Each structure stands twice: as C-alpha cells, then as structure tokens.
Image (cartoon, coloured by chain):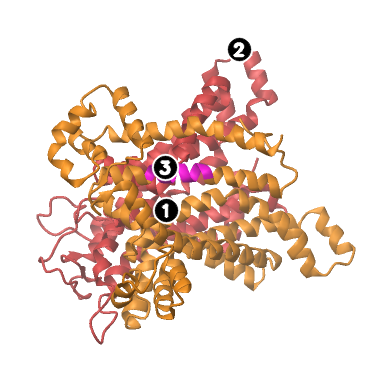
Chain colours: A red, B orange
Amino acid sequence: MTGLGFILYQLRRNPLSIIGITIILIFIVIAIFAPVIAPPPEGHINHYMIPRYGYSPTPKPPDAEHRFGTTQGQYDIFYGVIWGTRSAFYVGLVVIGSVLVIGIVLGSLAGYFGGIVDEVIMRITDIFLAFPPLILAMAITVALGPSLNSVILALIIVSWPVYTRLVRGDILSVREEDYVEATRGIGSSHARIILRHILPNSIYPTLVMASLDIGAVVLSAAALSFLGLGAPEGYADWGQMIQFARNWIVGLPGNPFAYWYTVTIPGLFILFFVLGWNLLGDAFRDILDPRLGKR
Amino acid sequence: MELRTYIIRRLVLLIPVLFGVTLLIFGLLQLFDPVERAALYVKDVRQFSEVGAIIERYGLDQPVWIQYGNWINEIFHGNFGWSKVVAMPVLDAIVNFLPATLELAIFATPLIIFGGIFLGSKAAAHKDRTVDHATRVGAIIGWSLPTFWLGLILLMVFYGFFRGFLPPERLSTDVSILVHSDVFTRYTRMNVIDAILNGNGRVLGDALRHLILPVITLTVVNLAFIMRLMRSSMLESLGRGYILTARAKGLDENSVVNKHARRNALIPVLTVSGYIFAAIVNGVVITETIFNYKGLGWWAWQSAINLDVPSILAFALFNGVLFVLTNLVVDLLYARIDPRVRLGAQVT
C-alpha cells in the first residue's frame, strides 16, 4: 500500500503535477470569490444568470467596463466565465459524488456477495455500457427536457456503470484475504466486514482516480451545453458561451479575428480547468501504477 | 474452443444485452407524452393528422408491456418512425446520412490508430528525452481540449483568416450542384470515392478540402489517448525479459523496438478499440455539428435540439447495436493476435 507521505513526495517531485495543482487551486479561488471578482450588478436577482447590456446580437470587444467584451446578445463574457467556474464545479462535484456513492454501494454488493446479485448488477451495467456515452447522454437530456440538472442526471446515468465495475474489481481483489476471513470467523456482520475491512483496504486508488475525473465530466457537460442541451440561455456556463460564439468565428472583412474573444476566452477556461485535473490525474496514475513505479 | 462455437455462443449472449438495450430506450420513451410517442409509428407526413387514431391503434394509453410489444414489432418490420427534421422516415435518414459519416471515419480512424501507435512507441523508445516530454505534454493538452472549441478555432483560422481556404459543410455550392447533376454518378454517396470513380478531379479536390478540418478535429483528442496508452504499454513491454534476450543476441535496436517490443505492446491498444469506436461516434456528433457536415452526427444533433424523439432514439439504438457488434469483433481479433488468449476462457 502506498503511503500518503510517499504520494505527496512523488507529487512534489513531478513538475507537471505541481502545475496541475496550481491550476485547480486558482479555479477554486475563482469559484469561491466569484461575487468579489465579478460582482453582480445592482438588483440582479439570480447571480448565475449572466447580466446583459442591451440586446444587439453583435459582440462588443473588451473595454474598461466589460473586461473580456460581450458575446452575442450582449452577455458579459467576464462575468460568464467567472460564475461559470462555479457551475463547472457544481456539475463536476455532483456527478462524481453521485456516481461514487452508486458505484460503492452496487460495486460492493456485486463484489462481496457474488452469485446472482453480481450477475444481475453486471448485466445491467452491460446494457448501459452498450451505448457510446455521449449519445446516451444526449438521448437522456432530450427525454428529460434540456436543462443543467438534466445534463447532471444524464451524466450520472451514463457513468455509474464504469465506477460500479471498478469498485467491484477492487472488492474482488481483497475479498478472499485472510483478514477478511478472520473477521468473518469472529462473527462480524456483512455490513461491518464491507465497511470496516474490505472498503478501506481496497478502494482508495479508485476514489482518487475517480475524483480526478471531474475534468472529464465537466468536458462532457460542456459538450452537451454546446450542443444546446444544457443550461437555459444566459446561464453562466462555459459550453453555452462557446455555442453563442459559433456564429462569430468569421470576423469582418479586413479583420478576420474581429470577434476572437467570444470563442477563445470561454474555451481557454474549459481547457485549463480540464487540463489541471488531467495533469494531476496523469501524475497519480504513474504513482499508483506499480508496474511503472520502480523504473 | 473452436472459433465457430465461440462466435455462436457470443451471438447468443448478445440477445439479452440487446434486449436490455431496447428496454432502456423504451424506458426513456416513457418520459414523453403519448402524442410525442405517436411520432414513432408515423410512416408518412400525412399521418400526423391522425395522431389520435395512432394512439388508439398502437395502444399508447395501454399498459407498458403491450406498448413495448407493439414497438418491438414495428422495429422488426423496419419502421423506426418519422424524422421530422429531415422530413423522411428514420430508416431512410440513417441510410441517407451514413455515407458522409463513414467518409469522415475512413479518414480519421487510421490516423488515430497508426498515428497514436507510432507516436506512443517513439515516446517510449526515447523515454525521458525531448521526444517523450514533447509528446507527453502534447498528449495531455490534446486530451484536455474541448473538441468543439478546437473545431471552432480551426475554422476561425482556416476559414476566416485564410479567406475560405478550408470551409465547413461537405461541398461548395457549385460543386454540390455538379455532384447532384446527371453527369456525375453517385455510386457510394461518399464524395471522395465517387469523385475517384467518376474521374472528376474538381470534385475530389473540393471534397478533400472540406474533409481536412473535420478529420483533424476528430483525430486530435483520440490520437492523444492512444498515444498515452501505447507509451505505457510499450514501456512495460521494453522492460521484459525477451527484450533483454533480443538485445543480448545482438539484434539492432530498430528490430528490437519495432518487432519484439511493439507487437507485444499492441495488445492493450487493441483491447480499447471498442472504446475508440465509441469515442469516434461521440466525436462525430460534435465535429459534424461544428462544421455543418451533414452526416449522422449532424442529423442526431438536429434531432436532439428539435426534440425529435424517434430520430434520437433510433440513433442511440443504432449505435448501441453497432457498439456491441464492434466489441464482439474486437474480442475475436484479440484471440487471433494474442495466442495466449483462449477463446471462451473469459466469457461469463
């Protein structure tokens, strides 16, 4: 078992993981201090709706008042990307948290009890895994009616089977260990064996890797938003802001990049957010992979 | 186990999964009201005036299991409903849009697989040197890139800045008129192949020009994934005893890397090709949406934003079946390439 101290030591040694951690910390600060960085205008009721400054469809370039300019429909880009950070964390944390809970419960049941329970749960995961995830998520969001919560629910529905299988595999690897047998021998209940003895000894690597999937989840959510299946119009959401920018990628005659800010800025926010998590995930994968550790 | 027995056994095992797939799709369907569901049974635009009669006839207000039976029955008779966004039956729409998507996949898939394998093994063979670090950073960034954003940026540069050099859509207007005229025979409906068959250089050039950006967009993210996988698998392979043996007997480094190490390292890459298929299908929806490239993905997107239930469900069902079959083929290939795998040993 790799100790926490060792992991921290390895992380510090790896410059890429340091960059990853820094990026994530910056985003956490942005999310927490969103009301300070981009204060909502007076009388703005729902802070997650981007304030509009007029109704003209043509984007306006950055100036003193709108630091990143305004996008189609005069939504303030700066406000949108800052508050969009909160939406991103919200989606990522809710989805990952939910699939981990589902995965741990169903995965433990399947792995520990085996037999018919295992068979039923695994066949159900087979069915969900029989679809390309984004396609199934699209169908689900359409069925539920496009909204941010539909996106979250759809992503939970398409990703729980993966985590259930991972947890099941972890459980299987320690189920027959001597200490489990010993606990069973002294008459512990199934719940106690699973919660106190099996889970703590098997699922930490999975937990760590799963929590770093937040980046991937946010990327999928942004893709669904971009396709027009996500949050309502004007909600602070990166994917939707890129959708707004779609019509403005070709600039004016003589100035081809006239509207560069509409597409570039929200895109960079998504890219860096995902990159932060992926850098950290990559470092963890190297540390936790015993085959690569000794070289 | 003999190959034929194995295939038959796998095909039999597919039945419960496919049954589950239809159940899942049907379950999603129950979230809609009967009028929307009636669209599934419409074969013709005129029938929309008789929605009440359709609800009656297919028992859309009946218990769920009866509805399921009716629905499956229609599917087996080839009626997947009416796609309102393109105003044709869903099955016709799939047949109509499939060639465009296939064309995209035919160009992107080899690039993803061979490019990923090549770069990944290069990185592993030069571990911790410049090539390795460069590909590693490239792969992580590529893997984090939002596909839709990459596509838009590419369009901004190559369509906006370079004055329509690499445009969106499938063909330019004038070439499109030519393709649909009598002088041009559309054998496969894949423009590049048809252009070659017709010996028409102008159409070929135009079709390729329209394909470059979508293919790049589709390739980058998935290439990064294969590259990373190939690198770690190759590193593991290079550390094995048979590599030491090969080097000890004086083989030159190229043979060691290309023959002994790479062939063994390919196995994990093969196992994820089913996943790659899914990733390409996912990517196709987004890529075709960005470039207004009218293929299956574009149609699925149009159906999704117009809440066209029959189309989106048929698309999901179509992909589900295709995905399951792909995984079967992958398993067969796997057993063929790796003699250590015995057919049927892992089937549960």
Residue A93 shows in this picture: no
Which residue lies at the image location 68% right of the left edge and 39% below the top edge? B3
Q: Are marks 3 and 1 on the same chain?
A: no
Report the disc number at residue A96: 3
Measured in 3D between alpha carbons, the distance from the residue under mark 3 to the one under mark 1, in whole angstroms, is 20 Å
Q: Which residues are magenta?
A: B316-325
Residue type of the residue flagged with mark 2: Gly
Q: Is mark 3 in CB contact (under 8 Å) with mark 2?
A: no
Residue B67 quadrant: top left
Q: Quadrant of the C terminus of chain B?
A: top right
Secondary-structure class at tag 2: loop
Secondary-structure class at tag 1: helix
Residue hosting label 1: B282
Residue type of the residue flagged with mark 1: Asn
Query: Which one is closest to the eye, mark 1 or mark 2?
Result: 1
Measured in 3D between alpha carbons, the distance from the residue under mark 1 to the one under mark 2, in whole angstroms, is 50 Å
Q: Earlier in the sequence, mark 3 or mark 2?
A: 3
Q: Is residue B7 magenta?
A: no
In terms of depth relative to the viewer, which is nearer, B277 or A93? B277
Report the disc number at residue A187: 2
Report the disc number at residue B174: none
Q: Quadrant of the N terminus of chain B?
A: top right
Residue type of the residue flagged with mark 3: Ile
The residue at the far top in this view is A187
Number of residues whose C-alpha sits closer than 10 Å to that of mark 1, classed few (under 14), some (14–19) or many (20 or more): many
Q: Is mark 3 in CB contact (under 8 Å) with mark 1?
A: no
The residue at the far right in this view is B249
Q: Is mark 1 in CB contact (under 8 Å) with mark 2?
A: no
Measured in 3D between alpha carbons, the distance from the residue under mark 3 to the one under mark 2, in whole angstroms, is 34 Å
Question: Chain letter of disc 3?
Answer: A
Prevailing secondary structure of the magenta residues? helix
